[in-house]
Image (tube, rainbow, N blue to C red):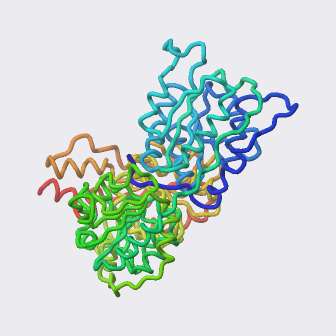
């Protein structure tokens, strides 16, 4: 299940499938390889990159991508990094990226990134090289039933057994990945198929169906309900990512406060007077107050997963029907009313639905959300003693404050899993769209590969990865990929020598810790330099400010090893306090 439901976004996605439903006349043209046909389908769908660790099971596919003028083959250092890169690019652009891995171990390594795409509703196409056709089902070298393996973590998984069907299946994979609730699709291909010569494909599937609108009756009922409520709020998720202007227009037209769902903070400007906060882990009680007191909650493009709903507690609804204070708009009918009862559930595209609501002339009460907005602002402000203390390891609040001072407002921030992220979620203000790349799946190791992909997809943007010392050593080798490709990304490592999230849970629930100490402080700056990137160590606020300035001027990747206080385990608690409590 996903935390949010997203749609392909932007003009690139809307025009991505032109030509896929046309007949492709072969004439007297010589037959080409199945791989070449597949790559033409990908290029016609505006796919621009394939991330991979090259494998022997898809030699011709990698070669065809490398030879195509409109596609780029990005060789990574681990399939886990390739999966995260493809997911991050698709999340940032709304257009699918491709990941490819070879059979057995390669496919297993790729699975974490694919699971992330599934939970984050991100469109991806995954090619999995398989053993050759004559050996299938005989437990051949590195053979795994890839369709069975990938079915639970994809929208669709299939194995193709005919080379002349590969282009057709690729077009269908793109269609499935991007329609309805987006997600990853896996196509397993025996190693002998890509190189076979096939006739030109004809009448390929591909053109997207119209985005479902909000019905007039539903629109009018929702408008009347929002206008009449005393304390309405909106919860906006990833499905509203392409509808930022429409979401702001609805909030202003109906004078309604807006929450953003878990790790979707950039779908609504955080400095807007109607912004109420982020429904994330450890959401402060002050931020939740408006949601708890709401008499009308409109959920747009969010599944109300465990974290957004605060362990399925909010918003409350006695049951479906008129007694429920909740209405939901989602493109996926399976998500409407799946978690809590709704009095009205509309299956519609978020952008189309919000645009319809925004156009209606309505009279709304003069509701005042200023105090609710200030309550969020207070939780997003670093305590003076944390941000300015002069001695000892840096407080995580101080790191976020330094980033805010040094980085442009429209920086693309990729963030990893870990307790440091709680400070980032609180302290970083998302004022611009498409500036947050964060896995709702909570996958460690996401940030560095995501930053590589973000810089490739948006080379003129400032891209910064925020990661802990646990996550950086899972996929930090992708700094070599960034260095090889000349990508100027900055990686800020919060190094506290702990698997901090688990240490916090152990201290809180058991009163002691086990297995959460990791070696430190490590010389991560030297690690980065060994991979061809720049490296700096920051133990004070001044050193951190200087390192951020130097990284901004660098022409390649830079890792900043920030030594942080392990006792600062969350914005509300210290590790010592939990252990002694």
362 is higher (above) or lower (below) than 572: below
Q: Nearer the viewer, residue 426 or 420?
A: 426
Q: Is residue 305 left or right of residue 99?
A: left
Horizontal arrangement in the rendering, residue 408 relative to residue 573 (left or right): right
At which x and y percent is residue 57?
Answer: 61, 25
The image quadrant of residue 232 is bottom left
| Along the line of sight, the residue nearer the viewer: 10 or 421 | 10
Tally the numbered discs.
0
Query: Is residue 168 at all visible to an observer of this figure?
Result: yes
Res 254 → quadrant:
bottom left
Residue appearing at x 60%, y 17% in the figure: 133
On the image, the x and y values in percent for residue 505 come to 22, 50
Residue at left 31%, top 55%? 307
Q: Nearer the viewer, residue 236 or 78?
A: 236
Give the image location of residue 198, x and y in percent: 75, 26
Q: Which residue ends up furthest to the front in the rendered image?
A: 217
Q: Residue furthest left?
A: 581
Quadrant position of the C terminus in the picture: bottom left
Relative to 417, is 6 on the left or the right? right
Name of the residue lying farthest toward the right: 28
Query: Where residue 146 sits: x, y (%)?
Result: 49, 27
For residue 406, say whether it is visible: no
- Asked if residue 135 is positioned above or below residue 21 in the image, the reply reads above
């Amino acid at each position: 299940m996903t935390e949010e439901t997203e749609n392909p976004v932007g003009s690139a996605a809307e025009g991505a499938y032109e030509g896929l439903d046309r007949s492709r006349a072969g004439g007297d043209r010589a037959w080409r390889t199945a791989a070449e046909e597949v790559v033409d389908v990908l290029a016609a769908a505006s796919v621009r990159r394939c991330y991979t660790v090259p494998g022997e099971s898809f030699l011709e596919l990698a070669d065809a991508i490398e030879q195509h003028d409109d596609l780029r083959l990005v060789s990574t250092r681990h399939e886990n990094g390739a999966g995260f890169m493809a997911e991050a690019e698709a999340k940032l652009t709304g257009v699918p990226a491709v990941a490819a891995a070879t059979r057995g171990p390669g496919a297993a390594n790729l699975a974490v990134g694919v699971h992330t795409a599934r939970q984050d509703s991100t469109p991806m196409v995954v090619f999995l090289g398989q053993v050759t056709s004559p050996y299938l089902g005989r437990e051949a070298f590195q053979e795994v039933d890839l369709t069975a393996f990938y079915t639970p973590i994809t929208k669709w998984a299939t194995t193709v057994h005919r080379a002349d069907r590969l282009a057709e299946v690729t077009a269908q994979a793109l269609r499935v990945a991007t329609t309805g609730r987006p997600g990853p699709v896996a196509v397993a291909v025996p190693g002998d198929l890509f190189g076979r010569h096939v006739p030109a494909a004809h009448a390929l599937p591909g053109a997207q169906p119209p985005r479902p609108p909000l019905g007039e009756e539903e629109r009018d009922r929702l408008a009347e309900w929002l206008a009449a409520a005393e304390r309405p709020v909106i919860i906006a998720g990833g499905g509203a990512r392409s509808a930022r202007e429409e979401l702001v227009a609805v909030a202003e037209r109906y004078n309604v406060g807006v929450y953003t769902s878990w790790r979707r903070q950039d779908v609504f400007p955080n400095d807007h007077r109607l912004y109420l906060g982020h429904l994330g882990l450890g959401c402060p009680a002050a931020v939740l107050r408006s949601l708890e007191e709401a008499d009308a909650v409109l959920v747009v493009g969010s599944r109300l997963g465990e974290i957004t709903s605060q362990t399925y507690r909010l918003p409350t609804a006695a049951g479906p029907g008129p007694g429920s204070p909740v209405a939901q708009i989602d493109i996926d009918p399976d998500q409407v009313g799946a978690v809590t009862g709704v009095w009205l559930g509309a299956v519609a595209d978020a952008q189309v639905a919000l645009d319809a609501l925004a156009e209606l002339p309505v009279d709304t009460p003069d509701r005042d959300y200023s105090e609710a907005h200030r309550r969020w602002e207070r939780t997003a402000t670093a305590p003076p003693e944390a941000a300015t203390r002069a001695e000892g390891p840096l407080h995580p609040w101080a790191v976020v404050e330094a980033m805010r001072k040094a980085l442009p407002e429209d920086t693309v921030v990729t963030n990893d899993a870990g307790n440091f992220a709680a400070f980032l979620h609180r302290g970083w203000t998302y004022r611009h769209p498409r500036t947050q790349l964060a896995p709702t799946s909570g996958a460690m190791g996401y940030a560095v590969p995501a930053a590589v992909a973000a810089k490739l997809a948006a080379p003129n943007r400032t891209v910064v990865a925020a990661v802990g010392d646990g996550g950086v050593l899972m996929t930090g080798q992708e700094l070599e990929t960034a260095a090889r490709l000349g990508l100027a990304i900055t990686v800020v490592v919060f190094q506290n020598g702990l698997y901090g999230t688990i240490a916090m849970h152990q201290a809180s629930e058991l009163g002691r810790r086990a297995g959460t100490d990791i070696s430190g402080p490590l010389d991560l700056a030297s690690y980065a330099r060994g991979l061809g990137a720049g490296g700096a160590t920051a133990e004070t606020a001044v050193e951190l400010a200087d390192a951020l300035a130097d990284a901004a001027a660098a022409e390649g990747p830079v890792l900043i090893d920030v030594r942080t206080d392990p006792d600062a385990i969350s914005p509300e608690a210290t590790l010592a306090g939990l252990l002694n409590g």
